[in-house]
């Protein structure tokens, strides 16, 4: 961050008092007003529900320009990474700040590969879950439980512990995810294979059965790898901020990542691709699209077009473009020439992008709009969609968590509030209370 030369002045219109605050500039992107001294100097807080105007940290990992549709990791455009790189390289980039050279890449891949197995006792941990559990519930539980298995990497003040915990999480999430699926199917768990790449290994653990050989289709593995790249990190979104907030109290890394998975689960965040597929199935046929578009625009109807809109992108989500291309590649490879859901999705995109409501509000398809169709073609069940997102995002969470721990200005996260509740009341003994809580009576 540059030295503060620019300032802004805040004026209290009633008293005429003024205060000056520094303006900080990053390497690119909007400047920020440094209000760290705001409360101390003015006795006031800022009010920003949803943190729409609040920068919570310095970061050099990911840059987004939502108006221009730009997403860069450590300076590299996401389109270039998705086209030319692979997930292990992107993981290294996020963690270490630049792309690896060949020996660095080989060592990183080998180190990750050598951490993909789970402690054997985790097997029995799975049987505590109901067979029909949502796999995201299993993910939250098992990732959180890693802290009870790997005591030798819990000291967040020790860089070696942090590195081992980071590698463990990146390496083990595909195994945990695939086993959540196997458990729901009642099939034996398939162990990781060191000869396979990260994406191949995931597909193998998901779809191999002990009774026969399973050959991973390289085109499909490449598609999964690309999906992992596209979801690897996305700056200070809800789940990443959750990880940082949990980590700011010095909680252990496995617990922090479990909290990120819990946040990702929501349909407004990682659950959106699952919601897109449900929505397309509900729409069913092209002639019903206008009816749903009408509902999405109706203020009295809570329905929203799933896979549309984004807090940051007010232009095309650059990931959605790559995702649409990948979707066609996967369907071609699988010989699916006529996928009704894809036709429906493309028609819906066309109609929405011509509609004044979506144009005015700058609502474009986001990364989740096409990923569900790819997953469906790959035979990945709907309940696993958000799990795949969690597998990919783990590296982003881990990189952001490390950056936070290493930041000397880091403090425990503690937002303030605008209190609108009652003023001081005297305690009335139970037998003397005539009126109770109006809210409880309504319920
Ligand atoms: N369909 C219809 N209207 C929408 C949609 C949508 N998908 N998204 C936003 N709007 C409207 C809102 O009603 C609001 O209208 P108003 O100004 O008249 O009140 C306006 O656009 C702005 O929307 P907000 O909800 O204020 O924007 P916010 O940045 O808070 O929300 C979000 C972003 C949550 C992603 C929203 O667009 C949404 O719910 N989309 C559908 C869910 C989805 O696809 N989520 C995936 C996000 S990507 C990811 O997590 C990887």
Image (cartoon, grey):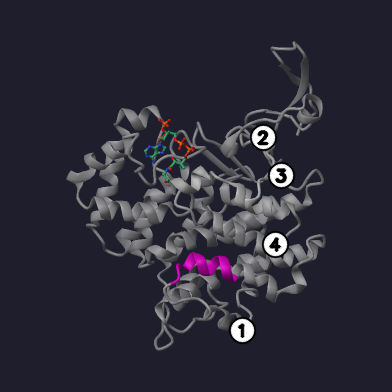
N-term mark: 1 or 3: 1
Q: CA distance from mark 2 to mark 1?
A: 56 Å
Task: Check disc 2: other Cα within 10 Å, few if <14, some if 14-19, many if 20+.
Answer: few
Q: CA distance from mark 4 to mark 3?
A: 19 Å
Mark 3 secondary-structure assignment: loop
N-term mark: 2 or 1: 1
Front disc: 2 or 4: 2
Task: Check disc 3: other Cα within 10 Å, few if <14, some if 14-19, many if 20+.
Answer: few
Is the residue under label 4 in contact with that under label 2 (CB below 8 Å)?
Answer: no
Task: Check disc 1: other Cα within 10 Å, few if <14, some if 14-19, many if 20+.
Answer: few
Label 4 lies in ligand 1 vicinity (Cβ under 8 Å):
no
Q: Position of residue 147 (x, y in %)?
A: 69, 70
Q: Can you identify the residue that label 3 sits on?
A: 414
Q: Position of residue 107 (x, y in %)?
A: 68, 67
N-term mark: 2 or 3: 3
Q: Position of residue 25 (x, y in %)?
A: 71, 29
- Mark on residue 253? 4
Residue stretch rendered in magenta on the structure: 133-142
Is the residue under label 4 in contact with that under label 1 (CB below 8 Å)?
Answer: no
Q: CA distance from mark 1 to mark 4?
A: 21 Å
Image height check: is 88 above or below 45? Answer: below
Q: Can you identify the residue that label 2 sits on?
A: 423
N-term mark: 2 or 4: 4
N-term mark: 4 or 3: 4
Q: Can you identify the residue that label 1 sits on?
A: 120
């Amino acid at each position: 961050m540059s030295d503060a030369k620019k300032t802004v002045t805040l004026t209290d219109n009633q008293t005429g008092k003024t205060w000056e605050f520094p303006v900080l500039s990053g390497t690119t992107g909007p400047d920020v007003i440094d209000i760290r001294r705001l409360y101390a100097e003015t006795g006031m807080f800022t009010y920003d529900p949803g943190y729409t105007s609040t920068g919570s940290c310095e970061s050099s990992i990911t840059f987004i320009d939502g108006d221009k549709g730009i997403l860069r990791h450590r300076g590299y455009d996401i389109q270039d990474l998705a086209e030319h790189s692979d997930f292990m390289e992107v993981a290294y980039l996020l963690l270490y700040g630049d792309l690896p050279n060949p020996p660095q890449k080989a060592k990183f891949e080998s180190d990750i590969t050598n951490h993909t197995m789970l402690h054997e006792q985790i097997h029995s941990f799975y049987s505590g879950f109901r067979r029909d559990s949502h796999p995201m519930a299993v993910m939250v539980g098992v990732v959180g439980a890693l802290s009870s298995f790997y005591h030798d990497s819990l000291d967040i003040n020790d860089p070696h512990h942090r590195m081992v915990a980071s590698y463990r999480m990146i390496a083990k999430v595909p195994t945990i995810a695939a086993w959540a699926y196997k458990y729901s199917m009642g099939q034996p768990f398939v162990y990781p294979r060191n000869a396979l790449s990260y994406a191949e290994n995931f597909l193998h653990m998901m779809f191999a059965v002990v009774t026969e050989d399973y050959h991973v289709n390289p085109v499909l593995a490449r598609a999964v790898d690309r999906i992992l790249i596209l979801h690897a990190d996305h700056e200070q979104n809800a789940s990443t901020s959750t990880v940082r907030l949990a980590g700011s109290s010095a909680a252990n890394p496995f617990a922090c990542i479990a909290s990120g998975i819990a946040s990702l689960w929501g349909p407004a965040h990682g659950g959106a691709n699952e919601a897109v597929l449900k929505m397309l199935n509900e729409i069913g046929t092209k002639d019903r699209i206008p009816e749903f578009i009408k509902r999405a625009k109706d203020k009295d109807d809570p329905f929203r077009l799933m896979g549309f809109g984004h807090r940051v992108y007010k232009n095309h989500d650059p990931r959605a473009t790559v995702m649409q291309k990948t979707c066609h590649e996967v369907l071609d490879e699988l010989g699916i020439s006529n996928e009704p859901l894809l036709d429906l999705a493309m028609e819906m995109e066309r109609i929405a992008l011509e509609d004044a409501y979506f144009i005015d509000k700058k609502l474009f398809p986001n990364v989740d709009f096409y990923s569900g169709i790819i997953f469906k073609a790959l035979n990945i069940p709907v309940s696993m969609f958000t799990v795949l997102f969690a597998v990919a995002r783990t590296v982003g969470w881990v990189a952001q968590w490390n950056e936070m721990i290493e930041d000397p200005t880091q403090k425990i996260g503690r937002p303030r509030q605008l209190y609108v509740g009652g003023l001081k009341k005297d305690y009335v003994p139970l037998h003397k209370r005539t009126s109770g809580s109006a809210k409880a009576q309504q319920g």
